[in-house]
Amino acid sequence: MRKILVTVTAAAIAVTGLSACNAKVTDDGHTATVPDGPAGVPSETGVPGPGHKPSAPSHPENGTGGGAGGAGGAGGNARSGKLSYVAPGKFQVGDTVFFTATDTVLIVEGGKCPDGAARPNNRCTTDNMEMWVKSAPRFAKVSFSGQSATVIREVAG
């Protein structure tokens, strides 16, 4: 009789899916089942929930001059807006934060480069760019490759 009871109990557990992994003993000694996944984890269906709203990039542009040899940088991913200093080597244009690299090109609207040099076509390095951005309001069109700026072109604000 005991063997039958153990078999029936095992079958009931298998059918209902109860196991030590998804059962919880409450303070009063009763067993309560726990949901299949952690709270707040999306299901595997790939279907957005009722509160999902698609996000759009801020100030997108269609990357004019965006070829590999063009001034727009690779991929045509560009943003325009007020240029702000965030941290060393990290800036923001509009609401997009980006990094500068050693090969980032800065094209100034007029005058001298941030490092004080006058260069042909106003093409500058990013040396002293932090001070240049902090010294006056600057507006720019920034072309990206990933999270790094390839070209920062100062524009009239």
Image (cartoon, rainbow, N blue to C red):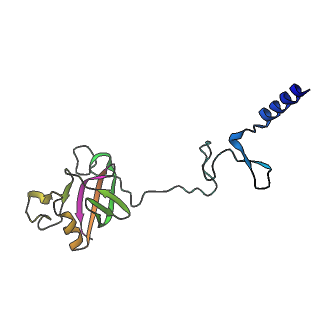
Left or right, 17 with respect to 37, comes to right
Question: Hey, which residue is sitting farthest bottom in the picture?
Answer: 136
Look at the image and tell me in which quarter the C terminus lies.
Answer: bottom left
Q: Position of residue 153 (x, y in %)?
A: 23, 60
User: How many callouts does the rendering have?
Assistant: 0
Residue 137 part of the magenta-drawn span: no
Q: Position of residue 55 (x, y in %)?
A: 49, 56
Front-most of residues 75 and 149 = 149
Question: Hey, which residue is sitting farthest front in the picture?
Answer: 2
Relative to 146, say whether 139 is above or below.
below
Relative to 71, say whether 18 is above or below.
above
Residue for point 22% across, 65% down:
130
Residue for point 19% across, 68% down:
132
Front-most of residues 38 and 81 = 38
Q: Position of residue 125 (x, y in %)?
A: 15, 57
Q: Position of residue 22 (x, y in %)?
A: 70, 43
Residue 153 part of the magenta-drawn span: yes
Question: Over which residues does the magenta segment extend?
Answer: 145-157
Residue for point 23% across, 47% down:
70
Q: Main secondary structure of the magenta part?
A: strand
